Image: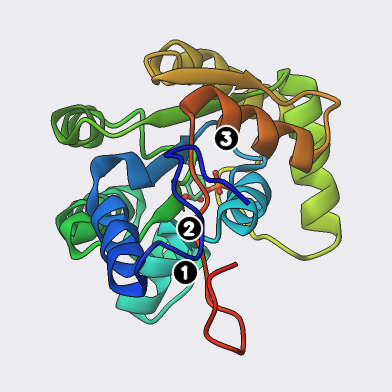
Amino acid sequence: MKKRSGKTARATPRAAVRHTQVRTAQSRGHVVFLVGFMGAGKSSVGRALAGRLNWRFEDLDDRIERHQGRRVAEIFRDSGDSEFRQAERSALAAVLGELRAGTARIVALGGGAFVDKQNAGLLKEAGVPVVFLDAPVEELWERCCAQAAEEKTERPLLRSREQFAKLYDERREKYRKATLRVRTGSRTVDAIAAEIEQALGLRKIRTRNEEGEFE
Ligand code: S3P
């Protein structure tokens, strides 16, 4: 089988293949940040996209929880919104600082992260792609309520429908500053992941099978 370069796949030396993989993983093209309101599907889409590409998936809220040793809801309850926002800024700065280490990854940010001026500035400065997952507020509300009912996610900012809609209105213009906006309403997670993959021209990282061959 011919590769695009005209060389046969067998003729490519192993060391050269490994080198290419590492080098591309280190490039800035190997990170994508997902932003959007609560319930937009940032974690589900992020996992699906990471799975398609063999990249790592990371949820910034999980990093904050590991670092603080308590749940996001507990941080809000015991220390307040501003301490959570500070922890969020530090966690994002830490992720951006690790990019040169070379692990290709999809990072889902919590709903308030990208609306913070400092965070948006850090992402802009880093020149990394930021994808806004956009959906109608009614659908976001329904999804968050369904998740809360399943006790999957405890969201401190999920209070009344009116407050939810007000916060959404306040934030939406800020999300629109992202590199790419993808509509998620009434679409499958995989279709959304495929759209992002194609729109950003993301490339799958090759892995080795049990025989040590690249797949
Ligand atoms: C928040 C959204 C949450 C979490 C925190 C604050 C927000 O993440 O970071 O409760 O300000 O919108 P999700 O967007 O993943 O629910």
Q: Which residue is mark 3?
A: 197
- Residue 78 against residue 116 in the figure, above or below: below
Q: Which residue is mark 2?
A: 205
Q: Earlier in the sequence, mark 1 or mark 2?
A: 1
Q: Earlier in the sequence, mark 2 or mark 3?
A: 3
Which amino acid type is marked by label 2? Answer: Ile
Which amino acid type is marked by label 1? Answer: Glu
- Residue 52 against residue 118 in the figure, above or below: below
Pick the residue in front: 163 or 57: 57
Residue displayed at 79% across by 53% down: 147
Do tag 1 and tag 2 residues touch (Cβ < 8 Å)? no
- Residue 163 against residue 189 in the figure, above or below: above
Nearest to the eye among marks 3 and 1: give it.
3
Q: Is residue 169 visible?
A: yes
Mark 3: secondary structure = helix
Pick the residue in front: 106 or 162: 106
Q: Position of residue 20 (x, y in %)?
A: 30, 57
